Amino acid sequence: MDQTTRRLSLPESPREFGFWLDGSYRGGRALFERASPGHGVPVTLIPKCTPEDVNAAVAAARRAFEDRSWAGLSGSDRAGVLQRTADLLRQRAGELAYWETLENGKPIAQARGEINHAISCFEVGAGAARLLHGDSFNSLGDGLFGMVLREPVGVVGLITPWNFPFLILCERVPFILASGCTVVVKPSEMTSATTLILGEILAEAGLPKGIYNVVTGSGRTVGQAMTEHPDIDMLSFTGSTAVGRACVHASADSNLKKLGLELGGKNPIVVFADADLDDAADATAFGISFNTGQCCVSSSRLIVERGIADRFEEMVAEKMKKIRVGDPLDETTQVGAITTDAQNETILGYLEKGTAEGAKVLTGGTALDMGGGSYIAPTLFTGVTPDMSIAREEIFGPVLSSFRFDTVDEAVKLANDTAYGLAGSVWSRNIDTALTVARRVRAGRLWVNCMLAGGPEMPLGGFKQSGWGREAGTYGVEEYTQVKSVHVAFGKRNHWVE
Ligand code: TXE
């Protein structure tokens, strides 16, 4: 690192990866060149796997599941591997953060924070592996006893997006492994490096071969082959609502595999006049600008009490203007680059649509020229009405739409006026008001007087069209299990045929 500028350097040449199959890297495939979105410079070369590679990875995962080299271990032995993984992640945190930043465009300091979160996921997963248990029914009379067993669901397919490549992976993998399942992962073609490096780390931690496999490549070939695969028992998908819907169809048309889906969001932040407005303004600017708003739980709709709305919007705009947008490799950067060209076009399109539909830009509203890479200024639209596309559609960028309310009922109605239900935040010093809103907003995660808080102990997932199922914590482990009822009879049978 250059100590005078506190900026990491770009790699001298792109790093070439193999895909991870049955405990080792495999090569020989055509390569996809990924350029750093912050600089436009090639940083990695990633294999374009084929549907045959998916078949090989699923076969390896099936063999490893059936031979019970993992599912047959005690929870405590599985926990040992997960805990050793956490220790190794700590040793390689700098390297992981570096490749995450290069492929994704997020600030290096933020990437390090995400690796720390991933370490916590493995630690919580280790605990959950030991605590996973079933149930019993001692209430069936003296002649019968009931046991409810939790068994691993089998081979899991995991398809992840590019916005938090390692964090989203690690909110799932430790819990999948804790349950005794085996897994085939397909990361986004834009951000595969850290998912591949995890293969090396798990192997070093003692995970038997075939339990964790990674196939890289496009969604249309590799991802689609996984959604349709007859030997994948469960698919966990995180990404767009459109592809989530396609996963449902593919499951219906193949083997009715179980699905976990974490999809889009259009999340409200509700601010009452009695809130600590200074804190609320900071959280509002953070909630939409963090990770350039490419975050499924971004608070993208500000719902503010009318009496303070003008002043509060100004406070948020002032905060947004001060955010340090810039080179992801600079230690002081708070908001980095937009991750993909397609996403950059999408966000710029919404900036145009917002103005064309009659909303007013209070701050931002434009791309930023940093001499390379794609950057967009944190943006606040006022005068937004519920019918506008910037009010209804997930933009997945640093673009906040502001609405006003007079009563609690109206605030809740506006908050729930969306097809999505991933997250929400409410700000009030009145506990009645805050908890009433928290209880009535239909979403999987609510933050009261905070924003994006919490750890992997708590479940995450969506209501409505934001998805199915829950990840992380004990809920997350249970998601990857099947429940089996075992009935045990005592004494002599009462004969049916005399
Ligand atoms: O997502 P895709 P995209 C939203 C966000 C964004 C939009 C589009 O609004 O603007 O989705 O992003 C794989 N079968 N979110 O196009 O395509 C793909 O390779 C199987 C919200 O990048 O859904 C990648 O690994 N897999 C979100 C993953 O799906 C397929 C995070 C996600 O990509 C596939 C990302 C197919 N037919 C985007 N097509 C969140 N909830 O955080 C693609 N994929």
Image (cartoon, helix red, strand yellow):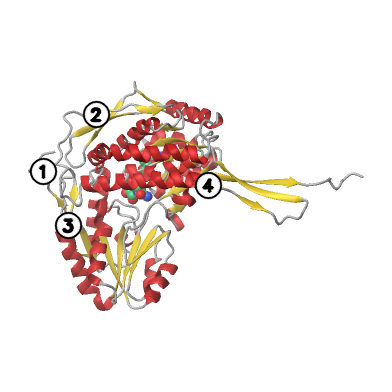
Q: Is tag 2's residue or tag 1's residue first in the polypeptide sequence?
A: 2
Label 1–label 4 contact, CB within 8 A: no
Which residue position is annotated with label 3? 323
- Element assignment for label 2: strand
Q: Is tag 1's residue or tag 4's residue first in the polypeptide sequence?
A: 4
Q: CA distance from mark 3 to mark 1?
A: 19 Å
Give the foreground label among 2 and 1.
2
Q: Which quadrant of the render holds ligand 1?
A: top left
| Residue 477 % position (x, y) | 49, 47
Is the CB of mark 2 within 8 Å of ligand 1?
no
As drawn, is 234 to the left or to the right of 365?
right
Give the foreground label among 4 and 3.
4
Label 4–label 3 contact, CB within 8 A: no
| Residue 288 % position (x, y) | 27, 58
Is the CB of mark 4 within 8 Å of ligand 1?
no
Which residue position is annotated with label 1? 371
| Residue 379 % position (x, y) | 21, 59
Which residue position is annotated with label 4? 132
As drawn, is 313 to the left or to the right of 424?
left
Of residue 212 and residue 301, the one placed in the foreground of this image is: 212
Q: CA distance from mark 2 to mark 4?
A: 39 Å
Q: Is tag 3's residue or tag 2's residue first in the polypeptide sequence?
A: 2
Q: Residues within 10 Å of mark 3 (few under 14, many from 20)?
A: some
Q: The residue under label 3 is which amino acid type?
A: Ile
Q: Residues within 10 Å of mark 2 (few under 14, many from 20)?
A: some
Q: The residue under label 4 is which amino acid type?
A: Leu
Which residue position is annotated with label 2? 15
